């Protein structure tokens, strides 16, 4: 039986120790299946949903069923997004994104599955990426499948709603904003082809991951020698399910995050430490051979 090795930041004289330990783990399991979450993008200025204990910091995000059923919910969503999406569209890649891309370039990453929708892994240079929950920069009609880029939709809605476009508010996760006003006058853009509901190409709560995406992630896991979870609490089952499958298959399972995870009982290695410096240290150690 493998024994979990937990390293808490408070017990470390320097994060270099965690980085060295992570490098040793990667060297022993050089075909890694990596899953990332919101913690990877917080250094990019994108807020996350949960605290170190895995609890919600704010109200949960919009539910798929509510978005589809209520025009008022869509008004509120798009009005807030018109303000908050700047955090996603203007975000720059973090050191954690770059370090994970470097690990792939060095041959250590079999597949990277991200629960984020910001596409920052791809912008950092990662190529073997599955966007498990979709991508926020693309909008799709739920009726006819028509697609357009998010920035084009926002530009049109800003033209339709100049008073809302001029508002400002604190940014929230996934392109939302803490905007609390009367949304009744907001005009929502419908599909220009069929008049259907336009929705970001993102898996909302209450929706399901497309089967092809899940199958591709499972195939990558079957080829891997180990699993590394980075910046994720794994509280959402769509991500946690892969850790459970890895545990059942006898794969070593490691986590680098600032807090608890849903998979804590399954982990063989765990580092509760800041992501970017630990990952950068691991890349440095591995690059020296």
Image: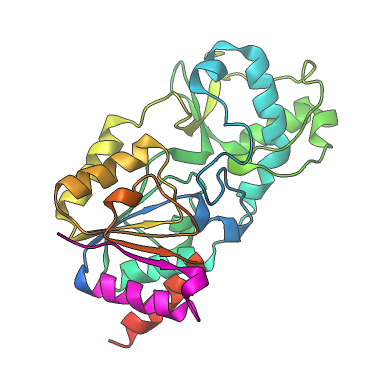
Q: Which residue corresponds to the image point at 27% horizontal and 68% vertical from the top-left?
A: 108
For the point 23% across and 63% down, the residue is 3
What range is drawn magenta here?
A: 1-27
Residue 193 in sight in this render: no
Q: Position of residue 69 (x, y in %)?
A: 55, 11
Q: How is the image coloured?
A: rainbow
Is 36 rendered above or below residue 167?
Answer: below
Say if the magenta span includes residue 15: yes
Q: Quadrant of residue 224?
A: bottom left
Picture coordinates of residue 198, whole percent (x, y): 55, 23
- Residue 93 vs residue 14, the one in the foreground: 14
Residue 265 in view, yes or no: yes
The quadrant in which the N terminus is found is bottom left
Q: Is residue 173 above or below residue 252?
A: above
Q: Residue at x 24, y 75 (%)?
A: 27
- The residue lying at 27 percent from left, 31 percent from top is 211
Residue 76 % position (x, y): 69, 23
Front one among 160 and 235: 235
Find residue 145 and report its horizontal and vertical position in percent. 43, 23
């Amino acid at each position: 039986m493998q024994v979990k090795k937990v390293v808490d930041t408070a017990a470390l004289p320097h994060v270099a120790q965690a980085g060295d330990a992570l490098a040793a783990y990667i060297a022993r399991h050089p075909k890694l299946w990596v899953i990332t979450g919101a913690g990877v993008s917080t250094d990019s200025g994108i807020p996350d949903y949960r605290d170190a204990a895995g609890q919600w910091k704010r109200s949960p995000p919009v539910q798929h069923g509510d978005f589809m059923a209520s025009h008022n919910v869509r008004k509120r969503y798009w009005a807030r997004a018109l303000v908050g999406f700047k955090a996603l569209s203007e975000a720059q890649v973090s050191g954690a994104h770059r370090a994970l891309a470097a690990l792939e370039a060095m041959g250590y990453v079999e597949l990277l599955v991200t629960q984020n929708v910001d596409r920052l892994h791809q912008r950092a240079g990662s190529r073997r990426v599955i966007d498990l929950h979709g991508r926020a920069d693309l909008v799709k009609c739920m009726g006819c499948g028509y697609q357009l880029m998010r920035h084009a939709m926002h530009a049109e809605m800003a033209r339709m709603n100049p008073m809302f476009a001029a508002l400002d508010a604190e940014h929230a996760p996934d392109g939302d904003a803490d905007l609390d006003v009367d949304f009744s006058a907001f005009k929502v853009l419908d599909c220009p082809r069929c008049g259907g509901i336009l929705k970001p190409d993102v898996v909302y709560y209450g929706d399901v991951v497309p089967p092809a995406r899940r199958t591709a992630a499972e195939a990558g896991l079957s080829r891997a020698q180990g699993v590394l979870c980075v910046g994720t609490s794994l509280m959402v089952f769509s991500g946690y399910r892969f850790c459970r499958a890895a545990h059942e298959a006898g794969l070593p399972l490691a986590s680098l995050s600032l807090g608890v995870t849903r998979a804590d009982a399954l982990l063989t290695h765990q580092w509760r430490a800041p992501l970017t410096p630990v990952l950068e240290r691991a890349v440095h150690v591995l690059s020296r051979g």
